[in-house]
Image (tube, rainbow, N blue to C red):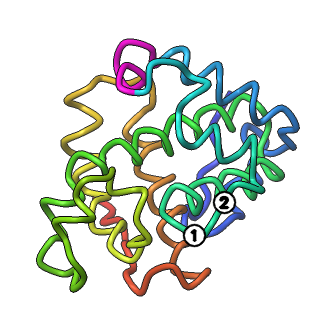
Amino acid sequence: MKVTELDAANFDYFSSPERTGVTENVIVIMKDVLTCFKGAIVTEHETAETYPLLKLIEKPEEREAKNCDMIFCEYLMQVSKLTNPEYFATIVKFIILYRECVNKYGWLKFENRITTDIEQLKTNEYTLTSYMEFIPDLANELVLSYLPEHKYPISINDCTNLAINFCTWLLNNGYTCLKITSVKK
């Protein structure tokens, strides 16, 4: 099937025939993707069921103030209404990889920008904080370093387009003032 090229900077990106649809079984797809990541990403969290994003989607009533993980979940729930289950699984892979990349590089990259008690915050994963503002700054690390280093089952093209889409969504929803763009060759 030929992939339709659409501007990744908005949700029209999901309207191509190979992406469009509705995903009703969000939790099942997330568990399947997390099971595929067993031994890599899921090792730290022991099982797919204990992975933070899955727990937030399963029990939204347990959310307190919005942190990065909750915003990742909000995005997933919105795009699940626009995409078919197969492409939604690709988006789940992307969000999980982006989350793990943020947790790997976030404190190192942003500690000089955060004005509160950074040492207390650093005891948690970066995505458990409310500092989503800086996340677009890690899009290059995700695409150019983290993804190739770990050889995960998502293409560089999908990862790049989804990074543009997600970061534009963050901007449009007031979670960041940072805008990323893709340089076409």
Residue in the foreground of this view, choosing between 110 and 163: 110
Is there a contact, CB below 8 Å, between mark 1 and mark 2? yes
Q: Quadrant of residue 45?
A: top left
Q: Is residue 39 left or right of residue 185?
A: right
Q: Position of residue 135 (x, y in %)?
A: 36, 66
Looking at the image, which residue is at 32% across and 57% down?
126
Circle 2 sits on which residue? 63
Mark 2 packing: few (<14 Cα in 10 Å), some, or many (20+)? few
Looking at the image, which residue is at 75% across and 53% down?
60
Mark 1 packing: few (<14 Cα in 10 Å), some, or many (20+)? some
Circle 1 sits on which residue? 66
Q: Image height check: is 57 above or below 130?
A: above
Q: Position of residue 125 (x, y in %)?
A: 33, 50
Q: Position of residue 100 (x, y in %)?
A: 35, 42
Residue 40 sits inside the magenta stretch: yes
Q: Which residues are magenta?
A: 37-44
Name the dominant secondary structure of the magenta segment: loop
Disc 2 residue type? Arg
Q: Image height check: is 53 above or below 1?
A: below
Q: Position of residue 106 (x, y in %)?
A: 24, 58
Q: Is residue 35 left or right of residue 118?
A: right
Residue 120 sits inside the magenta stretch: no
Disc 1 residue type? Lys
